[in-house]
Image: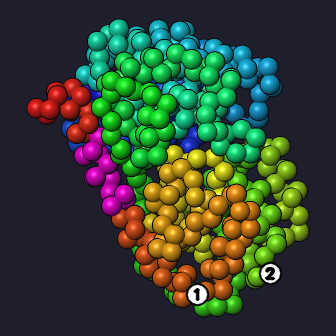
Amino acid sequence: MKILYINALYSPLIQGGAELSLKAIAEGMQAAGHEVVVLSLKPAGATSVEWVDQVKVYRTALKNLYWPFEKTRAGKWDRMLWHAKDRYNAAMRSAVKEILAKENPDIVSCHNLVGWSVAVWDEIKAAGIPIVQVLHDLYLLCPNSDMFKGNSSCATQCLSCSLLRKKHKQLSAQVDAVVGISRFILDRFENFHYFKQAKKYVIYNTRDVPASPLPPPRTNGSTFRVGYIGTLAEKKGIEWLIHQFKRLPIQAELKIAGGGKKDYEDFLKGIAGAAPISFLGYTTPSEFYKTIDVLVVPSLWQEPLGMVAIEALAHHVPVIANAVGGLQETVKDGVNGLLCNAAKENSLGDAIQRLYKDSSLYNDLVKNARQSVEAILSKERMINEYSSVLKEVVHGNNA
């Protein structure tokens, strides 16, 4: 089977978990005997082709006002114009048409379509090729991909989302199968009546985290090393974490790894003040997890899955998470971590303090952490599940 994957970015251009997961999927499917081609975006220039770890990758220029994957934030009006064109970017159809004609795939698997827009669905269907759409975020419901506004998640689409996503529900009927990376995100789209004609599946992303020995048991009184790793953005709840950490009357330190827009990074450093809080910038996750006792995922928006929580648990690191979105599918309160609630502001600080004081509970969570996500960590499981979905779409129930 020949598979064309379409995503905004592809390695080494990595913006987040979707790119890491797609690389694992593309390489895994190719290793399983399928022929794999990837189509992704670049800022400018003629369409190019290269090989990335034995995978054929096309990169074509984004035809919009600016390249959105920059550290600096574009102005308000430029962003509005960009999103208006991205509602249905007909100019991107020509690149898809060219690659479809050149490669003639049996099926197209669409991932993050930011920049491409849903115009690609029309081009793929015009070529008579089946479509599988993988849901990594809320882009198809919200131009900002998160349905987050005013420091909280949106229960419904606001006016701008309704306007900029007016025809997406109707166009989604062209999709033959849809895969949610969690039950939460699939249900979210079903609640908005998307993908009415599509077969529906849940396939959890995975990460390659080799097994490692359990860390030594923690004893009461030692410095508690709290960690955060990921994008630095308002929706990630980092301000909440910093304020909660600063109020704690315990011996602790907070390590924040990752990056974001420069003005927001500077703001966070300002509110951290003289507290024992360090900003590490981008760092290797496997090394970072060795330096912390607990990971906090204080996301205010509804994380589709929260891969960072799975990674931490795989490294025997318990997780404290806000009880929203897909995080609730992997972080189990009192089993491998603790859940808090942003509506109860002090619940986050209380959870950190609880694990600091109760070393017996903490050590139990450590023992349970890896085994609680062991099944998700199987790359073979993920590749087999995707292979089954694609074969069923192409060949029907006789696959």
Label disc, if present, on residue 359 of the rendered structure: 1
**Residue type for callout 1:** Ser
Q: Quadrant of the C terminus?
A: top left
The magenta segment: 375-386
Q: Nearer the viewer, residue 335 or 387?
A: 335
- Lateral position of residue 3 relative to residue 353, left or right: left
Give yes or no for residue 153 being in the magenta stretch: no
Q: Residue at point 22% right, 39% down?
A: 388
Q: Nearer the viewer, residue 397 or 270?
A: 397
Q: Residue at point 29% right, 21% down?
A: 130
Q: With respect to residue 181, does 77 lie above or below?
A: above
- Lateral position of residue 225 relative to residue 248, left or right: left
Quadrant position of residue 356? bottom right
Label disc, if present, on residue 249 of the rendered structure: 2
Label 2 secondary element: loop
Quadrant position of residue 348? bottom right
